[in-house]
Image: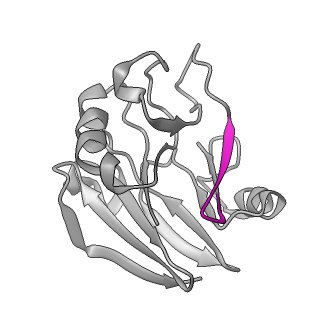
Amino acid sequence: MKLLFVSDNHGDAAILTQIKEQFGPAVAALFHCGDSNLPESDPAMAGYLTVIGNTDWGLNYLPVISRALEKVKIVVTHGHEYQVNTTLTPLMLLAKEQGAAIMAFGHTHQLGCEVIKGTLYLNPGSISQPRGQYAYLGGTFAVVEVTASAFHVQYYDRNLTPVPELSFHLAR
């Protein structure tokens, strides 16, 4: 099963539409980790399972969503209420409480993935305002392939091109 995660487009509807058109048919679900700055009624948001971010003023997205797909529990939050700039501990507690196999978040605008105690912690980075070591890519998002024994994480740049050095095989 493949899943797509994107975050922090900050009003850039066009990139969400491009991603959805190219990848939507090939993935089981599209997750948005917040700070879309777009209402649910915006056509660009159609098809994305979206959480509210700290700059999504006046929007009605939930702070946390969880979905079970093919017996894999995916939990998504933006992260600003879970101290993600300094620690993963509050996210780890949420993941444990929810029984998450994948705990996805945004907010930091920096990509990252690691498996801790069998749970994948994933930040797709910001698609429109990246920060950190990979900011030169112009933005990133991630596709995760889940198998019985591993998570295969492939990051893509803003041109929807896979980034070879950002391909990870992580045991479950």
Q: Along the line of sight, which residue is nearer the eye, 132 or 60?
A: 60
Q: Along the line of sight, which residue is nearer the eye, 100 or 86?
A: 100
160, above or below 172, in the image: above
- In reply to whether residue 68 is colored magenta, the answer given is yes
Residue 58: percent from left, percent from top: 59, 13
Query: In this figure, which colouring scheme has been used for the structure?
Result: one colour
Q: What is the magenta range?
A: 63-73
Q: Along the line of sight, which residue is nearer the eye, 17 or 28?
A: 28
Residue 28: percent from left, percent from top: 45, 54
Give the residue drawn at x 35%, y 50%: 131
- In reply to whether residue 111 is colored magenta, the answer given is no
Give the residue drawn at x 38%, y 46%: 126
Residue 122: percent from left, percent from top: 52, 62
Residue 76: percent from left, percent from top: 61, 48
Main SS, magenta residues: strand
161, above or below 58, in the image: below
Please indicate whether residue 119 sits to the left or right of residue 15 in the image: right
Can you tell which quarter of the image residue 65 is in? top right
Please indicate whether residue 132 sits to the left or right of residue 56 in the image: left
Give the residue drawn at x 48%, y 32%: 35
The quadrant of the picture occupied by the C terminus is bottom right
Question: In this figure, what is the number of numbered marks?
Answer: 0
144, above or below 9, in the image: below
Please indicate whether residue 20 sits to the left or right of residue 103 in the image: left
138, above or below 147, in the image: above
